[in-house]
Amino acid sequence: MREISKEEKDVFEALTSGKYTNFALVSTKFDGVETAVIVAVSKEGENVMLEPIAILVKPELFDRLVQPGADTGTETKTLN
């Protein structure tokens, strides 16, 4: 099992600290499975930007993720 990175720890602390108000819970599809994503919300000019922070991994989604020993290939999962 890998160690949690400093960046991941920093994001978790930001989410749980209560110091920031620019996080939102968004309903989306990931790899064809309806799920929820925690996003950081920012604004660039007139555009509202959503940056994915964490994805809720439901059982249907977990079944689609790479298991230890499986062929990892080079496929990238994207949010729809």
Image (spheres, rainbow, N blue to C red):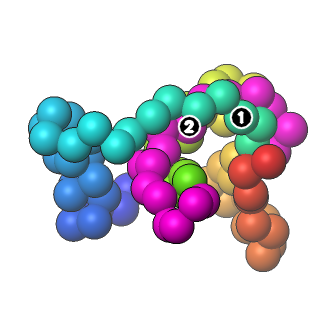
- Residue 37: mark in rendering: 2
Give the extent of the magenta segment.
Answer: 31-47
| Residue type of the residue flagged with mark 2 | Val
Q: Which residue is mark 1?
A: 28
Percent of width and height locating residue 72: 73, 67
The residue at the point 80 percent across, 32 percent down is 33
Left or right of residue 48, residue 64 in this image: right
x, y percentage for residue 48? 56, 53
Any magenta on residue 35? yes
Q: What SS does tag 1 mark?
A: strand
* The one of 13 and 39 positioned closer to us in this rendering: 39
Residue 63 in view, yes or no: no
Give the distance between the C-alpha atoms of the residues marked 1 and 2, in whole angstroms.
Answer: 7 Å
Q: Residues within 10 Å of mark 1 (few under 14, many from 20)?
A: some
Mark earlier in primary sequence (1, 2): 1
Q: Is residue 52 left or right of residue 8?
A: right
